[in-house]
Image (tube, rainbow, N blue to C red):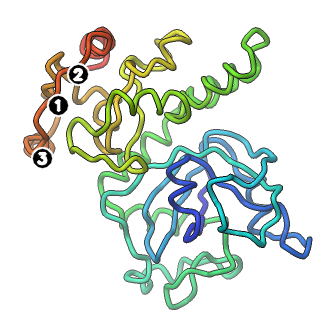
Amino acid sequence: MKHWWVNQNQTFAHEVGGGYLWSPKKKADGSRNYFYDSMTRVDPGDLVFSFCDTYIKAIGRVIGHHESRSKPNEFGEVGDSWSTEGWFVPVDFIFIDRPIRPKDHIESLLPLLPHKYSPLQDNGNGNQGVYLTDVPLDLAEALLSLMGPQVEALINDFKQPTTEVSEISDIVTDKVLPETQKAQLIQARIGQGLFRTKVSQIEPKCRVTGMTTPQFLIASHIKPWAKSDNSERIDGNNGLLLAPHIDHLFDKGYISFTDEGEILKSSSLDEMVLAWLENSIIPTPLNTKQCVYMEYHRINIFKE
Protein backbone atom coordinates (compact mmCIF):
# COMPACT_ATOMS: atom_id res chain seq x y z
CA MET A 1 0.00 0.00 0.00
CA LYS A 2 1.32 3.42 -1.00
CA HIS A 3 0.39 6.74 0.60
CA TRP A 4 -0.62 9.93 -1.23
CA TRP A 5 -1.35 13.56 -0.43
CA VAL A 6 -3.95 15.50 -2.44
CA ASN A 7 -4.47 19.27 -2.25
CA GLN A 8 -8.16 20.00 -2.79
CA ASN A 9 -8.76 23.62 -1.81
CA GLN A 10 -10.93 24.29 -4.85
CA THR A 11 -12.49 20.87 -5.37
CA PHE A 12 -12.69 19.32 -1.89
CA ALA A 13 -16.50 19.22 -1.63
CA HIS A 14 -16.93 17.80 -5.12
CA GLU A 15 -14.18 15.19 -5.00
CA VAL A 16 -14.51 13.97 -1.42
CA GLY A 17 -18.30 14.16 -1.50
CA GLY A 18 -18.38 12.40 -4.86
CA GLY A 19 -15.78 9.77 -4.06
CA TYR A 20 -13.09 10.49 -6.62
CA LEU A 21 -9.94 12.36 -7.65
CA TRP A 22 -9.73 14.24 -10.95
CA SER A 23 -6.88 16.12 -12.58
CA PRO A 24 -6.05 17.37 -16.07
CA LYS A 25 -3.62 15.20 -18.00
CA LYS A 26 -1.33 18.12 -18.81
CA LYS A 27 -0.70 21.75 -17.93
CA ALA A 28 -2.46 24.54 -19.79
CA ASP A 29 0.55 24.91 -22.09
CA GLY A 30 0.44 21.20 -22.96
CA SER A 31 3.48 20.20 -20.92
CA ARG A 32 3.67 17.26 -18.50
CA ASN A 33 3.04 17.71 -14.77
CA TYR A 34 4.49 15.33 -12.17
CA PHE A 35 1.48 15.79 -9.89
CA TYR A 36 -0.99 15.00 -12.68
CA ASP A 37 1.09 12.01 -13.77
CA SER A 38 0.83 10.73 -10.18
CA MET A 39 -2.80 9.85 -10.96
CA THR A 40 -1.53 7.05 -13.20
CA ARG A 41 0.63 5.57 -10.43
CA VAL A 42 -2.02 4.99 -7.78
CA ASP A 43 -3.30 1.47 -7.14
CA PRO A 44 -6.42 0.06 -5.48
CA GLY A 45 -5.86 -0.12 -1.73
CA ASP A 46 -3.59 2.95 -1.57
CA LEU A 47 -4.30 5.55 1.13
CA VAL A 48 -4.96 9.23 0.36
CA PHE A 49 -4.66 12.20 2.76
CA SER A 50 -7.06 14.97 1.71
CA PHE A 51 -5.71 18.47 2.48
CA CYS A 52 -7.95 21.56 2.31
CA ASP A 53 -7.78 25.02 3.91
CA THR A 54 -4.60 24.09 5.87
CA TYR A 55 -6.21 20.96 7.40
CA ILE A 56 -6.23 17.25 6.60
CA LYS A 57 -10.00 16.81 6.65
CA ALA A 58 -10.48 13.33 5.18
CA ILE A 59 -8.69 10.12 4.35
CA GLY A 60 -9.51 7.83 1.48
CA ARG A 61 -8.80 4.41 0.06
CA VAL A 62 -8.32 4.08 -3.69
CA ILE A 63 -10.87 1.55 -4.97
CA GLY A 64 -10.09 1.44 -8.68
CA HIS A 65 -7.52 2.15 -11.37
CA HIS A 66 -7.13 5.49 -13.13
CA GLU A 67 -9.13 6.11 -16.28
CA SER A 68 -9.48 8.88 -18.84
CA ARG A 69 -12.50 11.09 -18.15
CA SER A 70 -13.65 14.63 -18.93
CA LYS A 71 -13.63 17.32 -16.26
CA PRO A 72 -16.62 16.86 -13.90
CA ASN A 73 -19.52 19.20 -14.65
CA GLU A 74 -19.90 19.99 -10.95
CA PHE A 75 -16.56 21.80 -10.98
CA GLY A 76 -18.34 24.67 -12.73
CA GLU A 77 -16.03 27.64 -13.16
CA VAL A 78 -13.33 26.05 -11.02
CA GLY A 79 -10.34 25.27 -13.17
CA ASP A 80 -11.47 27.17 -16.25
CA SER A 81 -7.87 27.16 -17.43
CA TRP A 82 -7.59 23.37 -17.09
CA SER A 83 -7.92 21.11 -20.11
CA THR A 84 -11.19 19.21 -20.20
CA GLU A 85 -9.60 15.79 -20.65
CA GLY A 86 -8.13 14.35 -17.48
CA TRP A 87 -7.49 11.43 -15.16
CA PHE A 88 -10.20 10.03 -12.87
CA VAL A 89 -9.53 7.77 -9.87
CA PRO A 90 -12.36 6.40 -7.64
CA VAL A 91 -11.66 6.83 -3.90
CA ASP A 92 -13.69 5.83 -0.84
CA PHE A 93 -13.29 8.91 1.38
CA ILE A 94 -14.07 9.18 5.09
CA PHE A 95 -14.31 12.54 6.85
CA ILE A 96 -12.18 12.94 9.97
CA ASP A 97 -14.00 13.91 13.17
CA ARG A 98 -11.10 16.05 14.37
CA PRO A 99 -9.15 17.36 11.33
CA ILE A 100 -5.47 18.05 11.97
CA ARG A 101 -3.50 21.12 10.91
CA PRO A 102 0.00 19.99 9.87
CA LYS A 103 1.35 23.51 10.39
CA ASP A 104 0.70 23.08 14.13
CA HIS A 105 3.01 20.06 14.15
CA ILE A 106 5.62 21.18 11.63
CA GLU A 107 8.55 20.83 14.05
CA SER A 108 8.01 17.08 14.28
CA LEU A 109 6.97 16.68 10.63
CA LEU A 110 9.72 18.78 9.05
CA PRO A 111 12.47 16.10 9.27
CA LEU A 112 10.11 13.65 7.56
CA LEU A 113 9.22 15.80 4.53
CA PRO A 114 10.68 14.58 1.22
CA HIS A 115 13.30 16.84 -0.36
CA LYS A 116 11.52 16.69 -3.71
CA TYR A 117 7.79 16.98 -4.44
CA SER A 118 6.95 17.68 -0.79
CA PRO A 119 3.26 18.39 -0.02
CA LEU A 120 4.27 20.97 2.61
CA GLN A 121 6.60 23.93 2.74
CA ASP A 122 9.14 24.17 5.55
CA ASN A 123 6.84 26.59 7.40
CA GLY A 124 3.97 24.09 7.37
CA ASN A 125 1.91 25.73 4.64
CA GLY A 126 0.77 23.63 1.71
CA ASN A 127 2.72 23.67 -1.53
CA GLN A 128 0.37 25.42 -3.94
CA GLY A 129 1.75 23.71 -7.04
CA VAL A 130 1.02 20.22 -5.71
CA TYR A 131 -2.08 18.25 -6.61
CA LEU A 132 -1.29 14.59 -5.92
CA THR A 133 2.09 13.53 -4.55
CA ASP A 134 3.72 10.60 -2.78
CA VAL A 135 3.91 10.50 1.01
CA PRO A 136 6.89 8.59 2.50
CA LEU A 137 5.95 5.85 4.94
CA ASP A 138 7.47 7.55 8.00
CA LEU A 139 5.58 10.78 7.24
CA ALA A 140 2.35 8.84 6.68
CA GLU A 141 2.73 7.06 10.02
CA ALA A 142 3.39 10.36 11.80
CA LEU A 143 0.26 11.92 10.29
CA LEU A 144 -1.87 8.92 11.21
CA SER A 145 -0.63 9.00 14.79
CA LEU A 146 -1.72 12.64 15.05
CA MET A 147 -5.24 11.76 13.92
CA GLY A 148 -6.01 9.51 16.86
CA PRO A 149 -7.77 6.19 17.56
CA GLN A 150 -10.72 6.62 15.17
CA VAL A 151 -8.52 6.99 12.12
CA GLU A 152 -6.10 4.31 13.31
CA ALA A 153 -9.01 1.84 13.49
CA LEU A 154 -10.13 2.81 10.00
CA ILE A 155 -6.63 2.41 8.63
CA ASN A 156 -6.36 -1.04 10.15
CA ASP A 157 -9.54 -1.93 8.27
CA PHE A 158 -8.04 -0.53 5.07
CA LYS A 159 -4.96 -2.73 5.54
CA GLN A 160 -7.01 -5.89 5.92
CA PRO A 161 -7.62 -7.94 2.77
CA THR A 162 -10.68 -6.56 0.98
CA THR A 163 -12.91 -8.11 -1.66
CA GLU A 164 -14.27 -4.75 -2.82
CA VAL A 165 -11.83 -4.26 -5.69
CA SER A 166 -12.31 -7.80 -6.98
CA GLU A 167 -16.10 -7.44 -6.69
CA ILE A 168 -16.01 -4.31 -8.84
CA SER A 169 -13.71 -6.08 -11.28
CA ASP A 170 -16.21 -8.95 -11.49
CA ILE A 171 -18.94 -6.48 -12.44
CA VAL A 172 -16.79 -4.81 -15.10
CA THR A 173 -15.89 -8.13 -16.74
CA ASP A 174 -19.41 -9.61 -16.57
CA LYS A 175 -20.47 -10.21 -20.19
CA VAL A 176 -24.16 -10.64 -19.36
CA LEU A 177 -24.89 -7.40 -17.45
CA PRO A 178 -25.88 -4.37 -19.56
CA GLU A 179 -23.46 -1.44 -19.32
CA THR A 180 -26.04 0.78 -17.60
CA GLN A 181 -26.59 -1.83 -14.89
CA LYS A 182 -22.83 -2.27 -14.48
CA ALA A 183 -22.48 1.46 -13.82
CA GLN A 184 -25.33 1.41 -11.29
CA LEU A 185 -23.86 -1.57 -9.43
CA ILE A 186 -20.35 -0.11 -9.30
CA GLN A 187 -21.68 3.15 -7.91
CA ALA A 188 -23.85 1.26 -5.41
CA ARG A 189 -20.80 -0.70 -4.24
CA ILE A 190 -19.09 2.54 -3.18
CA GLY A 191 -22.27 4.12 -1.81
CA GLN A 192 -22.82 6.57 -4.66
CA GLY A 193 -25.08 7.18 -7.65
CA LEU A 194 -28.57 5.75 -7.93
CA PHE A 195 -28.27 3.74 -4.71
CA ARG A 196 -27.31 6.79 -2.66
CA THR A 197 -30.15 8.82 -4.19
CA LYS A 198 -32.68 6.11 -3.33
CA VAL A 199 -31.37 5.80 0.23
CA SER A 200 -31.50 9.59 0.68
CA GLN A 201 -35.17 9.64 -0.26
CA ILE A 202 -35.91 7.22 2.59
CA GLU A 203 -33.21 8.21 5.11
CA PRO A 204 -32.70 12.01 5.17
CA LYS A 205 -30.25 11.98 8.10
CA CYS A 206 -27.95 9.84 10.20
CA ARG A 207 -30.05 7.75 12.58
CA VAL A 208 -27.61 8.27 15.44
CA THR A 209 -26.10 11.75 15.13
CA GLY A 210 -28.91 13.51 13.25
CA MET A 211 -26.39 14.83 10.68
CA THR A 212 -28.15 15.94 7.48
CA THR A 213 -25.26 17.40 5.41
CA PRO A 214 -24.97 14.96 2.44
CA GLN A 215 -21.21 15.21 1.93
CA PHE A 216 -20.62 14.11 5.53
CA LEU A 217 -22.77 10.97 5.25
CA ILE A 218 -22.08 7.50 3.88
CA ALA A 219 -24.71 5.41 2.08
CA SER A 220 -24.22 2.07 3.83
CA HIS A 221 -25.82 -1.26 2.88
CA ILE A 222 -27.85 -2.92 5.65
CA LYS A 223 -27.60 -6.41 4.17
CA PRO A 224 -23.98 -6.53 3.05
CA TRP A 225 -23.17 -6.15 -0.62
CA ALA A 226 -21.53 -9.57 -0.82
CA LYS A 227 -24.67 -11.25 0.54
CA SER A 228 -27.15 -9.31 -1.63
CA ASP A 229 -28.37 -10.06 -5.14
CA ASN A 230 -28.15 -7.36 -7.80
CA SER A 231 -31.64 -5.98 -7.12
CA GLU A 232 -30.95 -5.77 -3.38
CA ARG A 233 -27.67 -3.98 -4.06
CA ILE A 234 -29.44 -0.94 -5.56
CA ASP A 235 -32.57 -1.10 -3.38
CA GLY A 236 -32.79 2.11 -1.34
CA ASN A 237 -34.53 0.21 1.45
CA ASN A 238 -31.31 -1.77 1.89
CA GLY A 239 -29.40 1.30 3.01
CA LEU A 240 -28.87 3.89 5.73
CA LEU A 241 -27.19 7.29 5.56
CA LEU A 242 -24.68 7.29 8.41
CA ALA A 243 -21.90 9.52 9.73
CA PRO A 244 -18.51 7.87 8.98
CA HIS A 245 -17.81 6.67 12.53
CA ILE A 246 -21.37 5.33 12.86
CA ASP A 247 -21.04 3.59 9.50
CA HIS A 248 -17.89 1.89 10.82
CA LEU A 249 -19.68 0.61 13.93
CA PHE A 250 -22.69 -0.57 11.89
CA ASP A 251 -20.63 -2.22 9.14
CA LYS A 252 -18.55 -4.15 11.69
CA GLY A 253 -21.62 -5.26 13.67
CA TYR A 254 -20.94 -3.23 16.82
CA ILE A 255 -24.39 -1.65 16.54
CA SER A 256 -27.66 -2.52 14.87
CA PHE A 257 -31.25 -1.27 15.06
CA THR A 258 -34.62 -2.64 16.13
CA ASP A 259 -37.58 -2.30 13.79
CA GLU A 260 -38.60 0.70 15.92
CA GLY A 261 -35.24 2.36 15.23
CA GLU A 262 -33.74 1.86 18.68
CA ILE A 263 -29.97 1.31 18.72
CA LEU A 264 -28.70 -2.13 19.69
CA LYS A 265 -25.18 -2.02 21.15
CA SER A 266 -22.70 -4.85 21.18
CA SER A 267 -21.41 -5.98 24.56
CA SER A 268 -17.90 -5.80 23.09
CA LEU A 269 -18.01 -1.98 22.88
CA ASP A 270 -15.98 -0.15 25.50
CA GLU A 271 -17.59 2.16 28.06
CA MET A 272 -16.51 5.36 26.32
CA VAL A 273 -18.26 4.43 23.06
CA LEU A 274 -21.34 3.16 24.92
CA ALA A 275 -21.61 6.42 26.84
CA TRP A 276 -21.19 8.42 23.65
CA LEU A 277 -24.00 6.49 21.93
CA GLU A 278 -26.37 7.52 24.73
CA ASN A 279 -26.50 10.96 23.08
CA SER A 280 -28.21 9.64 19.95
CA ILE A 281 -31.29 11.34 18.53
CA ILE A 282 -34.89 10.17 19.00
CA PRO A 283 -35.34 6.87 17.12
CA THR A 284 -37.41 6.68 13.94
CA PRO A 285 -39.15 3.40 13.01
CA LEU A 286 -37.96 1.54 9.93
CA ASN A 287 -40.36 0.92 7.07
CA THR A 288 -41.57 -2.60 6.31
CA LYS A 289 -38.96 -3.32 3.61
CA GLN A 290 -36.14 -1.94 5.75
CA CYS A 291 -37.19 -4.27 8.56
CA VAL A 292 -36.52 -7.32 6.38
CA TYR A 293 -32.96 -6.18 5.67
CA MET A 294 -32.35 -5.13 9.28
CA GLU A 295 -33.46 -8.54 10.54
CA TYR A 296 -30.69 -10.04 8.40
CA HIS A 297 -28.21 -7.56 9.91
CA ARG A 298 -29.29 -8.37 13.49
CA ILE A 299 -29.01 -12.11 12.92
CA ASN A 300 -25.89 -12.32 10.77
CA ILE A 301 -23.81 -9.18 11.36
CA PHE A 302 -24.58 -7.81 14.83
CA LYS A 303 -22.16 -8.91 17.57
CA GLU A 304 -24.41 -9.24 20.61
Q: Is residue 115 left or right of residue 106?
A: right
Residue situated in front as seen by the camera: 204 or 54? 204
Dot 3 or dot 2, earlier in sequence: 3
Q: Is residue 47 left or right of residue 44?
A: left
Amino acid at circle 2: Lys
The residue that mark 2 highlights is: 303
The residue that mark 1 highlights is: 268
Question: For the residues marked 1 and 2, what is the alpha-carbon distance in whole angstroms?
Answer: 8 Å
Q: Contact (CB < 8 A) between labels 3 and 2?
A: no
Amino acid at circle 3: Trp
Residue at disc 2, secondary structure: loop
Q: Residue furthest bottom?
A: 123
Q: Residue at x 72, y 42 (%)?
A: 65
Question: For the residues marked 3 and 1, what is the alpha-carbon distance in whole angstroms?
Answer: 15 Å
Amino acid at circle 1: Ser
Check the image and report above or below for 166 versus 146: above
Residue situated in front as seen by the camera: 274 or 57? 57
Question: For the residues marked 3 and 2, what is the alpha-carbon distance in whole angstroms?
Answer: 18 Å
